[in-house]
């Protein structure tokens, strides 16, 4: 089934039923009977979209025949995986145009493939949409319309616009490619109805068949070469159970449900452009109300998979912790890595509904995120545990003491933290290697110190003796160093960095993902953080000064280290999650 952007959710609202069908439409009762909802009439005049309700961007795009107050868009995720940032773009753009024209947004689960779909994915999609600030005016399900689509298929068969075909899959694919008519194309209406009933009953012979639209055999647009519109599937559906044994394809379902739900403008990614002709053919063949199509480009990132099938493979192989793995491009994955909802929305809406296909570097989206977190992220201190260097400070306090300091010097509203001052402090080996005896340095948020003796074993610094010089001028020192009091309150931490899951910028259709798996994608750096780490909660975003931004993934407890995930800051030289050299 095609993936246009799909998700699944539990019955949050009573799903509305289709608006009244044309006189020629079938009238059989559906197994699921949602309430009726009137859709707007097609707009008669276009107009520039005003700003959205949130005062967001105005793309100055005139949707074809859009009328203010009557535009209806829809976001149709398939509940076969978790929401990723490509889906987020589609959802946000559909919401934008609905709000810009003071219209409605339908969230519709395209649940027509029971082999892939379940309630878990459905629920997660609704939750992630809510986090993104997206709430549909209506929540519906394609499964609400199974009976309606079944009856429309019978109508097409009776009108000679569809036929049953039991041609083996590989042969059918070959014939479509070569423009060869199926040997079953001229079956009579009676034969086609018989085999469709066999399919509906799930009989052995019925399972060999599918229903194909009778459009063209030689069209240059191969999507019009008698596409499959119905197929058998005996897997119980997560909403309708075993009621149905046949299901419509996405390309048959989508135009029918769009038209009946009152959708005026269907936003589709540019990959669907060839299939737009098929969408329009279905509407015309069934004499349904016209729906206007607006194409926009899919969002792509280098070395990133957005195929739910391939992401599922990583989950199944145990190569990631789940759909919320911080290396995944899912909404949950990037949020766990430290992406804020505001940063994600700002980036996606900033790209707009362009039709140009672009492969983005992750640095762009993380740079947008940095603008959100930098003004509010509390500043804290951490040192790397490996070969940590202890400086013994002459003139330092005889007994360690604590003082309250601002968490963010430029934003007092962030609050205060405790800083311990002691005569022994830890500094990073990386800093210590740059020191020279007799040099004066600045211990940030304390004062200056003069380095007297530097102890080494080979090239490794093992300790330093220094003298506190609080009268020293910090403006004259070359090195401003982060430090941590060497007390029992230095808190164990684990700083975790990530790299791409795959090694190739963009996988070709013929590439096997197994051949491009990056074997090393997680990097751990044990360290010590200041005592304030002990009070932090999962999800807190902070900055360890001179190290970067981090999100707390596992809180400190019973001596077990607090686990922090690095948040990329958008520097061009930094890959998404790549370990810094």
Image (spheres, rainbow, N blue to C red):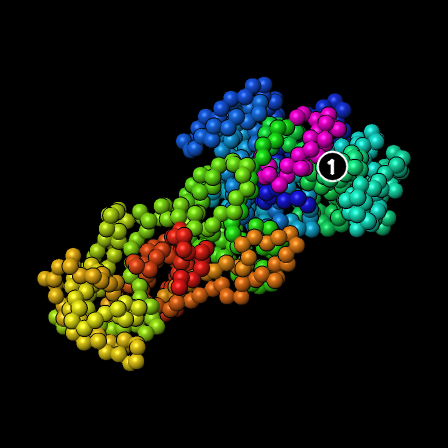
Could you say where residue 2 lies in the image, as x and y percent from the top left?
66, 44
User: Which secondary structure class fits the magenta region best?
Assistant: helix
Q: Is residue 315 left or right of residue 20?
A: left
Could you say where residue 120 lies in the image, as x and y percent from the top left?
59, 51
* Pick the front one: 179 or 27: 179
Q: For residue 393: magenta?
A: no
Q: Is residue 225 visible?
A: yes
Count of labels shown? Answer: 1
Q: Which residue position holds label 1?
A: 220
User: Residue at horizontal 41%, vertical 43%?
Assistant: 342
Secondary structure beneath disc 1?
loop
Q: Is residue 151 visible?
A: no
Could you say where residue 383 lies in the image, as x and y percent from the top left?
31, 66
Q: What are the residue bounds of the magenta stretch?
A: 267-290
Outermost top residue = 44
User: Residue at horizontal 16%, vertical 57%?
Assistant: 475
**In which quadrant of the rendered view does residue 575 lie?**
bottom left
* Quadrant of the rendering where the C terminus is positioned: bottom left
User: Residue at horizontal 18%, vertical 76%?
Assistant: 453
* Quadrant of the rendering where the N terminus is positioned: top right
Outermost bottom residue = 457
Could you say where residue 278 lies in the image, as x and y percent from the top left?
71, 34
Q: Residues within 10 Å of mark 1 (few under 14, many from 20)?
A: few
Q: For residue 285: magenta?
A: yes
Q: Is residue 55 left or right of residue 286?
A: left
* Pick the front one: 38 or 317: 317
User: Residue at horizontal 51%, vertical 22%?
Assistant: 47
Q: Is residue 106 left or right of residue 326?
A: right
Q: Is residue 417 above or below residue 286?
A: below
């Amino acid at each position: 089934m095609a993936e246009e952007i799909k998700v699944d959710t539990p019955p949050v609202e009573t799903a509305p039923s289709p608006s009244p069908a044309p006189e020629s439409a079938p009238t059989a009762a559906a197994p699921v009977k949602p309430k009726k909802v009137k859709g707007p009439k097609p707009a008669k005049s276009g107009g520039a979209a005003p700003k959205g309700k949130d005062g967001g961007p105005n793309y100055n795009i005139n949707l074809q025949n859009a009328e203010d107050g009557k535009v209806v868009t829809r976001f149709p995720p398939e509940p076969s995986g978790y929401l990723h940032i490509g889906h987020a773009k589609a959802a946000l753009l559909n919401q934008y145009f609905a709000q810009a024209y003071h219209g409605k947004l339908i969230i519709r689960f395209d649940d027509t493939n029971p082999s892939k779909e379940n309630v878990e994915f459905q629920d997660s999609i609704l939750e992630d949409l809510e986090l993104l600030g997206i709430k549909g005016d209506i929540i519906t399900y394609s499964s609400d319309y199974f009976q309606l689509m079944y009856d429309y298929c019978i109508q097409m068969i009776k009108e000679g616009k569809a036929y049953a075909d039991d041609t083996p899959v590989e042969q059918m694919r070959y014939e479509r490619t070569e423009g060869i008519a199926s040997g079953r194309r001229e079956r009579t209406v009676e034969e086609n109805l018989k085999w469709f009933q066999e399919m509906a009953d799930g009989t052995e012979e019925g399972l060999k068949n599918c229903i194909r639209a009778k459009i063209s055999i030689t069209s240059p647009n191969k999507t019009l070469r008698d596409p499959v519109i119905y197929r058998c599937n005996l897997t119980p559906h997560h909403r309708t159970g075993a009621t149905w044994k046949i299901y419509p394809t996405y390309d048959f379902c989508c135009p029918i449900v769009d038209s009946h739900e009152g959708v005026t403008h269907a936003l589709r990614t540019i990959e669907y452009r060839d299939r737009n002709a098929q969408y329009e053919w279905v509407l015309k063949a069934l004499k349904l109300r016209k729906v206007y199509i607006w194409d926009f480009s899919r969002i792509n990132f280098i070395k990133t998979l957005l195929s739910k099938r391939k992401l599922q493979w990583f989950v199944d192989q145990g190569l990631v912790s789940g759909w919320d793995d911080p290396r995944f491009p899912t909404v949950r994955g990037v949020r766990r890595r430290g992406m804020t909802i505001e940063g994600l929305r700002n980036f996606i809406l900033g790209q707009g509904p362009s039709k140009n296909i672009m492969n983005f570097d992750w640095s762009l989206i993380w740079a947008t995120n940095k603008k959100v977190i930098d003004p509010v992220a509390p500043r804290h201190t951490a040192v790397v545990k490996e070969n940590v260097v202890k400086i013994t400070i002459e003139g330092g306090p005889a007994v360690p003491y604590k003082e309250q300091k601002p968490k963010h010097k430029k934003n007092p509203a962030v609050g205060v933290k405790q800083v311990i001052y002691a005569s022994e402090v830890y500094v990073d080996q990386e800093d210590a290697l740059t020191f020279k005896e007799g040099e004066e340095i600045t211990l940030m948020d304390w004062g200056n110190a003069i380095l007297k003796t530097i102890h080494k074993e080979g090239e490794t610094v093992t300790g330093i003796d220094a003298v506190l010089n609080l009268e020293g001028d910090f403006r004259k020192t070359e090195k401003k160093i982060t430090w941590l009091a060497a007390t029992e309150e230095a808190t164990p931490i684990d700083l975790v960095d990530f790299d791409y899951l795959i090694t190739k910028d963009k996988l070709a259709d013929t590439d096997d993902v197994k051949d491009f798996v990056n074997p090393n994608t997680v990097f751990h750096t044990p360290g010590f953080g200041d005592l304030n780490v002990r009070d932090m909660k999962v999800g807190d975003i902070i900055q360890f000064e001179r190290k970067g931004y981090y999100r707390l993934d596992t809180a400190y407890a019973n001596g077990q280290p607090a686990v922090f995930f690095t948040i990329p800051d958008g520097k061009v030289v930094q890959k998404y999650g790549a370990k810094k050299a």
